[in-house]
Image: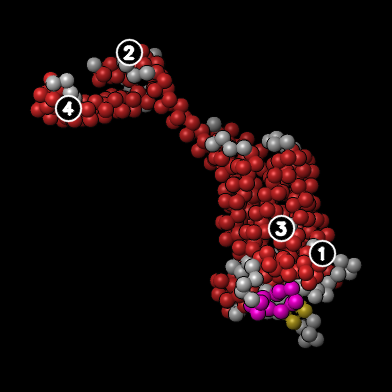
């Protein structure tokens, strides 16, 4: 009875047009059942005594599942099947709802991932190029016993674009990957019913690991070139610092250097310190942005720039001590200016923060805070204005394809 009713309902379209796809599935149900019915003849004694045969139970269970699957391929027949069979309409409907819900969730996550990657790559290029001189000034001020001073800007910003090529080559794909993973993870977490702050916290944490895996080698070389570390800049005949060496030569020098172990390990110096720094900085930035914007989507570029600049400046200022430590570690210098390798390995990230506070005080912990906040206003405005504009453009493109 179940087979015949399912065959009549599932092969009938909305306007009485027959469909061949459900018919194929129904025929497979009958063929499967025929195999089990032969064995069920041997179990008549069990059924006559009021029980149910093992194979009979399996065949009936299997046929019920396959029947629902057959009708699922023809959604407009669900109500008719619920009326003509003993299958509850809620059971049939839940099959379609869960299926469409899964498609919607995966579709939204994919769209967020693509738009996040494109917007992340675009904003990273612009942000890296514009803020690079301020980033160079920050690194120079944060080095121990630095000869640079904010009251001597010409000297501070001299050669401020030194070593920019490698960061551009790595930051663009790194930024794309970060925003692709962050936006997709956040979308999935929100669909799972998590509050916005929790979804943001998880998404930022997940995205930081691959981001710094891509970016860390270039960040190490950039920091050492900005700080004029020997081997990463040329030295003129009079002993003064010259230009930075090429990106390829800098990579070769880092791989052959004994600092931080040399080899690939040397290029990933400060990886965990970067994670420890970046997570609270990014989390504070994105949570502040969502708070200032009220969680609204599709903001204008001007609104995105204003909220983004403020949120980034707040985050950058309060995480300056963490930035001081990570830059010194990547540069290979401790608080006294000696090689980091000579410092006891038992000194972890936070013990270094404490040591700087004791030896250099507040000025040491917040060294370079002024240019950091300056570049934060600039980079935050660029980042979120570009991000909002690109996200909306990609979203409109997806809508036009539907």
Residue for point 61% across, 69% down: 269
Circle 3 sits in a helix, a strand or a loop, which is it? helix
> How far apart are labels 3 and 4 at the CA level?
72 Å
Give the quarter of the figure containing the C terminus.
Answer: top right
Residue tagged 2: 84
Of the residues under marks 3 and 2, which one precedes in the sequence?
2
Q: CA distance from mark 3 to mark 2?
A: 65 Å
Q: Which residue is mark 3?
A: 128
In front of the other: label 2 or label 4?
4
Q: Write down the region rendered in magenta.
A: 333-343
Q: Residue furthest right?
A: 151
Marks counted in the figure total: 4
Q: CA distance from mark 1 to mark 2?
A: 79 Å
Q: Is residue 22 above or below residue 349?
A: above
Residue 208 in the image: state x and y as whole percent: 60, 54
Residue 4, how many percent across, how many down? 25, 17
Label 1 environment density (alpha carbons within 10 Å; few <14, some 14–19, many ≥20): few
Residue under the point 70% across and 36% down: 295
In the picture of the structure, the residue carrying the numbered disc 4 is: 53
Q: Quadrant of residue 358?
A: bottom right
Report which residue position mark 1 lands on: 362
Q: CA distance from mark 3 to mark 1?
A: 28 Å
Secondary structure of the residue carrying numbered label 2: helix
- Residue 37 percent across, percent down from the top left: 15, 26
- Give the x, y percent position of residue 343: 66, 77
Alpha-carbon neighbours of circle 3 within 10 Å: few (<14), some, or many (≥20)? some
Q: Would residue 293 appear left or right of 275 to someone viewing this image?
A: right
Q: Nearer the viewer, residue 69 or 281?
A: 281
Please report contact status of discs 1 and 2: CB closer than 8 Å, yes or no.
Answer: no
Contact (CB < 8 A) between labels 3 and 2?
no
Q: Which dot, 3 or 4, sits closer to the camera?
A: 4
Q: Residues within 10 Å of mark 2 (few under 14, many from 20)?
A: few
């Amino acid at each position: 009875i179940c087979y015949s009713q399912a065959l009549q309902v599932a092969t009938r379209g909305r306007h009485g047009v027959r469909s061949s796809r459900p018919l194929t599935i129904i025929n497979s149900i009958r063929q499967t059942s025929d195999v089990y019915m032969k064995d069920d003849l041997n179990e008549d004694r069990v059924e006559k005594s009021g029980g149910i045969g093992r194979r009979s139970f399996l065949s009936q269970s299997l046929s019920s599942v396959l029947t629902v699957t057959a009708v699922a391929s023809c959604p407009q027949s669900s109500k008719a099947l619920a009326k003509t069979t003993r299958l509850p309409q809620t059971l049939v409907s839940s099959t379609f709802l869960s299926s469409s819900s899964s498609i919607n969730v995966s579709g939204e996550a994919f769209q967020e991932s693509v738009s996040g990657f494109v917007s992340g790559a675009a904003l990273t290029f612009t942000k890296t190029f514009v803020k690079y001189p301020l980033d160079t000034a920050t690194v120079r001020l944060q080095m121990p016993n630095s000869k640079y001073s904010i009251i001597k800007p010409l000297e501070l910003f001299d050669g401020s674009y030194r070593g920019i090529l490698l960061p551009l080559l790595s930051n663009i794909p790194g930024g794309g990957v970060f925003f692709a993973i962050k936006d997709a993870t956040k979308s999935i977490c929100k669909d799972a019913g998590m509050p916005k702050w929790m979804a943001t916290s998880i998404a930022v944490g997940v995205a930081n690991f691959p981001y710094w895996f891509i970016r860390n080698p270039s960040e190490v070389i950039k920091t050492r070139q900005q700080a004029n570390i020997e081997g990463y800049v040329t030295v003129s005949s009079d002993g003064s610092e010259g230009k930075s060496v090429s990106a390829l030569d800098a990579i070769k020098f880092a791989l052959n250097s004994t600092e931080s172990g040399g080899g690939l390990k040397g290029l990933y110096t400060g990886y965990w310190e970067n994670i420890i720094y970046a997570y609270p900085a990014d989390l504070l930035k994105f949570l502040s942005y969502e708070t200032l914007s009220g969680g609204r989507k599709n903001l204008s570029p001007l609104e995105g720039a204003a909220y983004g600049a403020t949120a980034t400046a707040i985050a950058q200022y309060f995480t300056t001590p963490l930035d001081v430590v990570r830059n010194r570690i990547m540069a290979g210098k401790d608080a006294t200016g000696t090689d980091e390798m000579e410092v006891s390995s038992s000194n972890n990230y936070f013990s270094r923060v404490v040591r700087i506070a004791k030896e250099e005080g507040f000025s040491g912990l917040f060294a370079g805070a002024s240019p950091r906040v300056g570049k934060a206003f600039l980079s935050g405005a660029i980042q979120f204005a570009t991000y909002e504009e690109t996200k909306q453009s990609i979203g409109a493109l997806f809508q036009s394809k539907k």
